[in-house]
Amino acid sequence: MKKNIFNLIIIIVSLAVPFVLVFSTQSIGNLLHQISRLDTRWIILAFLFMFLYWFFEALSLHIISVFHGFKEKVSNSFSYTMVGQFFNSITPFQSGGQPAQVVYMMKNDIDSANASSIVMLKFVAFQSVLTIYSLVVIIFTFNDFNARIPYLLPFTVLGLAVHASMIGISMLFSYNRTLTEKILKFVFKVLKKIRIIKGDEVEAEKKLEDSLSKFHDNAFLLKKNPKLLIELFILTMIQLSFFFAIPYLIYRGFGTDSSSFFELFAAAVFIATVISIIPLPGAAGGAEISSYTFFHFFFEGNAVFTAMLLWRIITFYSCIGFGGLFTVICPNKSKKEAS
C-alpha cells in the first residue's frame, strides 16, 4: 500500500512539473495571450507528427508479428503501441512499456515466448536506430551547442552510453542462451523464496525453460532474415524523424522562422539523449530543464516556457491520455491467460 502511494506521488509530481514551471514564470493571462496568438495550423501538424510517430511504431510491431506467423491487424499493433506508450510514460527509465505490451499480447492469444520476442526485437531496433541517429546528428552539431551550453559533453556521453547499454543487454538476452538461463533461474529462485511465485515449482520452471527456448529460437531465426531487420530500421528512422521534428513545428507556431529546421531538429535529438539518464517517470524535471536549456536559444522571453509546455503536452501528456484510453479498451480476453 505504501509503495503504491509513493508511486502515485511520483507520477503526480511528474505530471505537475511543467505546469509549475510555467505558472511560476508568468501569469495565466499572459500564457493564454501567447496561446491565442499561435498559428494553430503548425500546432495541429505537431500533433499529427506525434500520431505518425505512434503509427510507425505500430507498423514495426505489425511486421514483426506477421513474421512470427500471427495474422494480427494493424489496429491491434496500434493498441499494443499505445499501451507501451502509457506504461513507458509512468514508469522510471521507461521500463514498464515492454512488459505491459507482452501481457496485452498474451491476452490476445500470443504466447509469452513469441510476445517477448516481438517486443524485444522492436526494442533492439528502436534503441539501435536511436543511438546511431543521435550519434550522427550530435557529431555534426555538437560544437555549436557545446560553445553555448556548459557541461554538455559529459551529459551527452552518458546519455549515449545509456542507449548503447540497453542495446547490449537486449542482445545478451536474445542470443546468449546459457547466461540468460542462469540469470532467469536465479531470479526465479529468489522470487520463489520470497513467495512471489507460488504453486508447483517443477511445473513453473519447466514452463520457464520452454518459453526461454522458444524465445531464443525466434531470435536466431531473425539473424537469417536481414530483410526484416532492414525494414525495421527504415520504419524506425521515419518514426524518430517525425518525433524530432515536433519542436520545429512548435517554433513555427509562434510565428518565427529565423532558425533553421535542422537547428531545432538537432536540439530535439540532444534533449532526448540527455534526459535518457533521468530515472523518474517522464524524466520529470530533467525534461523541463533540458528543453528550456535548448529552447531558450530559439524562443524569446516567457515564450520559451510556453513552448516547453506545448512540447510536453504533445510528446508526453498525449502518451498518457491516449495510451491510458487504449490500456482500458485493449482486448482483454482473460486474466488467467496472462497470469
Image: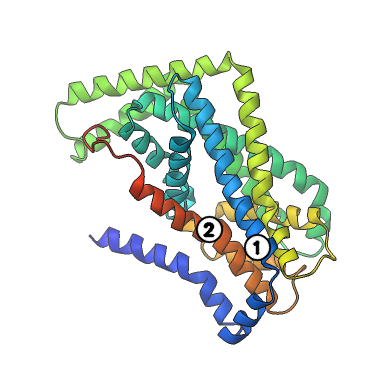
- Spatial distance from mark 1 to mark 2, Cα to Cα? 15 Å
Image mark count: 2
In this rendering, position of residue 196 left or right of residue 322:
left
**Residue projecting furthest to the right:** 258
The label shown at residue 43 is 1
Residue count near mark 2 (Cα–Cα under 10 Å), binned few <14, some 14–19, many ≥20: many
Residue 229 image label: none
Specify few, some or many for label 1: CA neighbours under 10 Å numbering under 14, 14-19, or 20 or more: many
Q: Amino acid at mark 1?
A: Ile
Residue visible at 65% across and 57% down? Answer: 46
Rendered image quadrant of residue 166? top right
Name the side, left or right, on which 282 lies relative to 163: left
| Discs 1/2, front | 1
> Where residue 318 sits in the image (x, y, percent)?
51, 58
- The residue beneath circle 2 is 316
Q: Residue at x 34, y 63 (%)?
A: 8
Asked if 57 appears above or below 207 in the picture, the reply is below
For residue 287, which quarter of the picture?
Answer: bottom right
Residue at 55% over, 81% down: 23
